[in-house]
Image: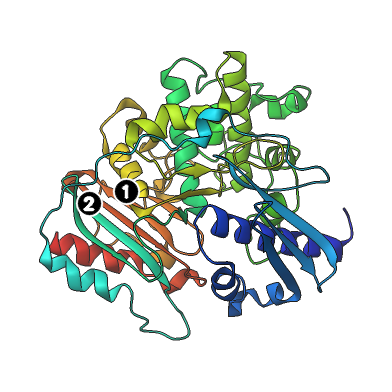
Amino acid sequence: MKNPLARIAAAGAGYKAKVLASAVFVSGREPEAVLAEDTRLDAYLILRLFSADVDREARSAEARFLGAFMPRTALVRPGLGAALAWGDPPAVSGPASLERPAPPKEDFAALSAPALEPIVADAFTEPNPARLRRTRAIVILKDGKLAAERYAAPFTSATPLAGWSMTKSVLGALVGAAVERGLMRLEDRDLLPEWSQDARRDISVADLLRMRSGLAFGEVYADPLSDVVQMLFAEPDAAAFAAARPLAHPPGTVWKYSSGTTNILSAVLRRALARQGVDYHSFAREALFSPLGMSSAVLETDAAGTFVGSSFMYATARDWARFGLYAAQDSPWMREARTPTPQSPDGRYGAHWWLKLSPELGGDEGLPADAFHALGHEGQCLTVVPSRELVVVRLGLSIYIDAWDHNAFLRRVLAAA
């Protein structure tokens, strides 16, 4: 699809259908609320050119450009969430085990922390009407106990919410689980058949984990023609789209944050597991979600059946916090993940974890040196501070990146916890 208008229309319809399907059938929200709140916001004016509706019997959502053109359908599969269909429905269905929730874990023990209550309540206020926070959920764990929790109606502790790029850290953890089991190695190269005849064969698993593949990739969310938007909402195979990009730099030499890199890594993980006879679609549940008690977690695939590890995981705020407890462990893999990537500016990135906050989120002033973060589009934040035994989850719909000052919030929490 080369026509720019057609590509924009495909991405817009794909976005609206995908977001609507996941919100309704994974999060359990009402379609009218999703269309009013998530896809008709001022920053996304272009989405008003797309109509959408839900078919509950088919468990699908369809969106169309100007009411009739470029129809895109997102279908929901048990255990695998929503995927955009391309011609025929997505061929991949999850194994029977994915149709049953992971065994639930006991709820967190409560910890009395009255000093946190006004801080958390303030996070749901709107001090700047031009930069709405739209906080939806906050969970704070201290010493492994639930110290604070709050939701904006109608969201509750049972509502799975999108992590967007926080999902990258989950995909990194799955690679870590595969490495620990001897199913793949960080130094593995020649990762994909389409790379075997050129310099891309020198890209290693470690290079992908540390965002230094050298591949060209545009990561501009506001541009519907950007690689990231086209990959997520206008392509049937996210990993193949990203893997087809040429090298802009020699592998391992330049750091560049790229959602395409994570989806390539997801495909590499899929190939590595297949070689060992391990079921890829069950691996997240068996290696991570079930042991941690993340019973709500849904990691979604694209139409090719590959997990969209860059962007598409839903979980309750409590289950995102459980993932934070996993990350807080002083395990060999988390020591690797928290080791700064030398090529990243100021060592701000590890292995699919942020080690420092960006200036837009308030920077790192006043935060403990060991704090690290999983961060996602629209203000999704998971912060882990091992030295304080603290996990902080904030989920929302902050369209403007500077609407949510995560540093200021964390400093208030740290002073009170």
Q: Which mark is residue 141?
A: 2
Return the residue found at the far bottom: 129
What's the distance in space between the residues labelled 1 and 2, CA to CA?
Answer: 7 Å
Q: Residue at x 59, y 38 (%)?
A: 307
What colour scheme does the image use?
rainbow
Name the residue carrying label 1.
321
> Looking at the image, which is closer to me, 172 or 48?
48
Residue flagged by tag 1: what amino acid is it? Ala
Locate the C terminus and report the quarter of the image it occupies.
bottom left
- What residue is at 80 percent from the left and 64 percent from the top? 9
Under circle 2, the secondary element is strand
User: Is 80 situated left or right of 102 in this image?
Assistant: right
| Residue 365: image location, x then y, percent | 28, 62
At label 2, the amino acid type is Leu
Disc on the earlier residue, 1 or 2: 2
At which x and y percent is residue 397?
48, 68
**Is mark 1 in CB contact (under 8 Å) with mark 2?**
yes
Near mark 1 (Cα within 10 A), the count class, few <14, some 14-19 or many ≥20, is: many
Provide residue 374's location: percent of width, then percent of height.
Answer: 41, 49
Whether residue 177 is visible to the viewer of this picture, yes or no, is yes
For disc 2, the neighbor class at 10 Å (few under 14, some 14 to 19, many from 20) is many
Q: Residue furthest front?
A: 57
